[in-house]
Image (spheres, rainbow, N blue to C red):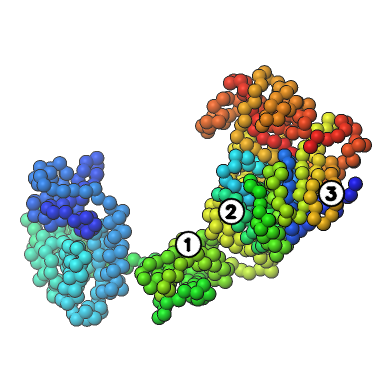
């Protein structure tokens, strides 16, 4: 399946394989039929494969992408029956009990499935039987469709490896001369169990239908997307907002059943000429209140160019966070809600991460005494106590022409001549050696609170290890 | 000399302006009297308010900072938040002079939302639409290191005046200091 997926994206001529680095060596991960015909097999070392088949073309494998693709295929396969599960890294298992007649019988269902997969460029091997084990055996070792009630007839001549057994068991059985499932079935059971443990007969019984085996379908993940198709195109702002309101009502009802709230929403407006325009909305808090979300869309919808008209709208909650149902109380949270709405609304203009708040940090370094965090993802916390007065304005250090460990009597700063009237200090602050910081390369700093005769109250520092004077802040 | 109380707790529902080296301190004093504020600044400016210093005036947890790309964004956000009224005070750091239209739009927004706006402007860049304009400067005082001179240099509905004030950290309020001529120390405060 993986190589088919790669070939769908970029077809090649000749044998093709995907390689994956396993145990520090490149090995073949998945091959197409051409490569299999050339005598290659899965798990072979890449270097060997090149020696066998010099014109082999390879690409690196992407197991994560393949898993995603398999999940998409699983979703597609629910068109045949509702019970579809994953089997290994490249298989699907379907329980078509009671669903085959909808396609005109099992044979028709198989041919339909084969045809559709072939059209999509996927080579498939399909086995159909009464039990999951027998179907697996048929799919992996000689395709076919077992007659109902007689799994043994179809499995009789298949190798024992078709029973989903471990490598050791298969080798052991081969040494005993038991190569076919039919031979195994006709052998006495007790010695086999004593020799190979219970698993062998469990697998055999599962294939023969003497032991039950379930198919567990994957749970459908909740889907937070709704759409609206219109018989006539619309273009007026009010109409689009009314449509959005309807979609929001549906979406919020769905969010409510899942106890979730939308964190970001995407409204796609498809126009008559097949152009699509999207309106993104990111919220300051997870929300599922349609009346509060709808006004936040106004700004984005106003900017949409409707062209010849919009005939399809789709609204999707692209990021969803859990939002449990909460008891209403008489202590209203109205003000906090209004503030969140304001943050969301401003966020649509300047970006939600640009609305920030200060959070205290336990550090003596002036510029690290606080952090700036996005308000939408943080709560105000901590206390702002500082043992010494701190300036209210900070700026990057501006050098002064001065020498000596005491603050200069007179100095020029920002084209002003200032003279020191009173200096309080020094307060020595050492760099935090455990955090590398370019600005603190000059070593310890002696900070002085300097009041000038001209009025300005500045925060100066001297770097004794690397002599120099700088201004870093201004006091009120 | 008129009373500071006639003009200082800034009239709500209006946009005011402050300039001078300690305009930030005036914003901090104003913020100490409200329950929450939004501070708008352009993200490229090197100067940043220090929450550790502001903690002497109000709890920085009540402050929201919005960093914008340019003054157009600043004004749009300011108008939006003034009109919304969720936060009673919006402090706007401006870097370029406001046109009369822009200033007037801010005034109307503040009137609608019953909020106070305070623009921190570079000196000499006031807008005609502002309700009041203040000049705030530090003053050297041998006995104290928080003395400021607040001068009202434009007032649409009152008289002009200048006062010496100091912020009392312990009780968190503004103390009015006796007029210049009678107070000890060097007379005549440089601006």
Q: Residue at x 62, y 55 (%)?
A: B75
Residue to which mark 2 is pinned: B72
Percent x, y of residue A288: 53, 68
Asked where in the image residue B76 lies, by quadrant, the reply is bottom right
Q: Nearer the viewer, residue A126 or B81?
A: B81
Tell me if residue A271 comes above or below residue B46 in the rendering.
Answer: below
**For the residue labelled by badge 3, is the local secondary structure a helix, a strand or a loop?**
loop
Local SS, label 1: strand
Name the residue beneath numbered marker 3. Answer: B160
In this rendered view, identify the residue nearer to me: A18 or A303: A303
Sequence-first tag of 3 and 2? 2
Q: Nearer the viewer, mark 1 or mark 2?
A: 2
Which one is nearer the viewer's eye here, B38 or B56?
A: B38
> Is residue A385 in view from this perspective?
no
Viewer can see residue A238:
yes
Q: Name the residue tied to disc 1.
A: A280
Q: Nearer the viewer, mark 3 or mark 1?
A: 3
Residue at point 28%, 61% (across, down): A70
Task: Tell me residue A237's x, y (percent).
Answer: 51, 72
Task: Give a yes or no on whether discs 3 and 1 share a subunit.
Answer: no
């Amino acid at each position: 399946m993986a190589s088919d997926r790669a070939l769908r994206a970029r077809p090649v001529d000749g044998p093709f394989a995907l390689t994956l680095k396993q145990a520090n060596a490149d090995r073949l991960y998945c091959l197409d039929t051409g490569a299999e015909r050339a005598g290659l097999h899965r798990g072979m070392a890449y270097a060997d494969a090149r020696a066998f088949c010099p014109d082999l073309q390879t690409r690196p494998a992407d197991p994560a992408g393949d898993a995603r693709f398999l999940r998409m295929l699983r979703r597609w396969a629910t068109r045949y029956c509702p019970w579809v599960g994953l089997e290994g890294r490249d298989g699907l298992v379907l329980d078509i009990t009671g669903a085959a007649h909808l396609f005109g019988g099992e044979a028709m269902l198989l041919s339909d499935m084969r045809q559709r997969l072939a059209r999509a460029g996927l080579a498939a091997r399909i086995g159909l039987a009464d039990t999951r084990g027998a179907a697996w055996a048929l799919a992996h070792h000689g395709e076919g469709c077992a007659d109902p009630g007689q799994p043994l007839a179809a499995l009789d001549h298949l190798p024992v490896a078709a029973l989903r057994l471990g490598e050791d068991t298969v080798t052991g059985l081969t040494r005993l001369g038991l190569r076919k499932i039919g031979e195994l079935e006709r052998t006495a059971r007790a010695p086999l169990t004593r020799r190979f443990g219970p698993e062998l007969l469990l697998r055999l019984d599962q294939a023969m239908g003497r032991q039950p085996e379930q198919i567990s379908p994957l749970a459908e993940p909740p889907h937070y997307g709704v759409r609206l198709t219109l018989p006539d195109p619309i273009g007026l702002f009010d109409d689009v907002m009314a449509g959005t309101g309807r979609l929001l009502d549906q979406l919020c009802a769905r969010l409510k059943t899942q106890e979730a709230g939308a964190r970001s929403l995407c409204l796609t407006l498809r126009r008559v000429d097949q152009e699509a325009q999207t309106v993104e909305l990111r919220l300051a808090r997870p929300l599922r209140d349609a009346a509060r979300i709808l006004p936040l869309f106004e700004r984005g919808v106003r900017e949409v160019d409707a062209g010849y008209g919009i005939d399809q709208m789709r609204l999707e909650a692209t990021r969803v966070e859990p939002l449990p149902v909460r008891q209403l109380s008489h202590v209203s949270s109205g003000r906090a809600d209004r503030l969140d709405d304001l943050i969301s609304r401003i966020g649509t203009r300047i970006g939600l991460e640009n609305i920030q708040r200060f959070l205290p940090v336990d550090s003596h370094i002036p510029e690290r005494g606080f952090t700036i965090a996005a308000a939408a993802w943080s709560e105000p916390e901590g206390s702002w106590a500082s043992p010494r007065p701190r300036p209210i304005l900070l700026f990057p250090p501006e050098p002064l022409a001065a020498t000596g460990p005491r603050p200069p009597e007179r100095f020029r700063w920002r084209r002003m001549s200032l003279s020191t009237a009173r200096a309080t200090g020094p307060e020595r602050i050492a760099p935090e050696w455990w955090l590398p910081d370019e600005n603190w390369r000059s070593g310890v700093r002696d900070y002085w609170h300097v009041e000038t005769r001209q009025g300005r109250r500045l925060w100066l520092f001297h770097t004794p290890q690397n002599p120099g004077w700088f201004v870093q802040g201004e006091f009120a | 000399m008129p009373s500071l109380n006639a003009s200082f707790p800034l009239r709500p529902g209006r946009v005011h302006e402050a300039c001078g080296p300690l305009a930030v301190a005036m914003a901090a004093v104003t913020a100490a009297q409200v329950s929450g504020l939004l501070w708008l600044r352009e993200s490229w400016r090197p100067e940043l308010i220090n929450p550790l210093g502001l903690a002497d005036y109000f709890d920085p947890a009540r402050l929201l900072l919005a960093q914008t790309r340019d003054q157009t964004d600043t004004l749009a956000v300011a108008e939006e938040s003034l009109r919304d009224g969720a936060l009673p005070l919006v402090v706007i750091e401006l870097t370029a002079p406001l046109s009369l239209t822009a200033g007037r739009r801010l005034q109307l927004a503040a009137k609608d939302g019953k909020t106070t706006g305070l623009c921190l402007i570079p000196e000499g860049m006031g807008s005609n639409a502002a309700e009041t304009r203040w000049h705030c400067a530090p003053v050297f005082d041998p006995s104290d290191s928080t003395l400021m001179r607040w001068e009202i240099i434009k007032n649409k509905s009152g008289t002009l005046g200048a006062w010496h004030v100091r912020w009392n950290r312990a009780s968190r309020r503004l103390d009015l200091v006796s007029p210049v001529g009678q107070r000890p120390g060097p007379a005549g405060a440089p601006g």
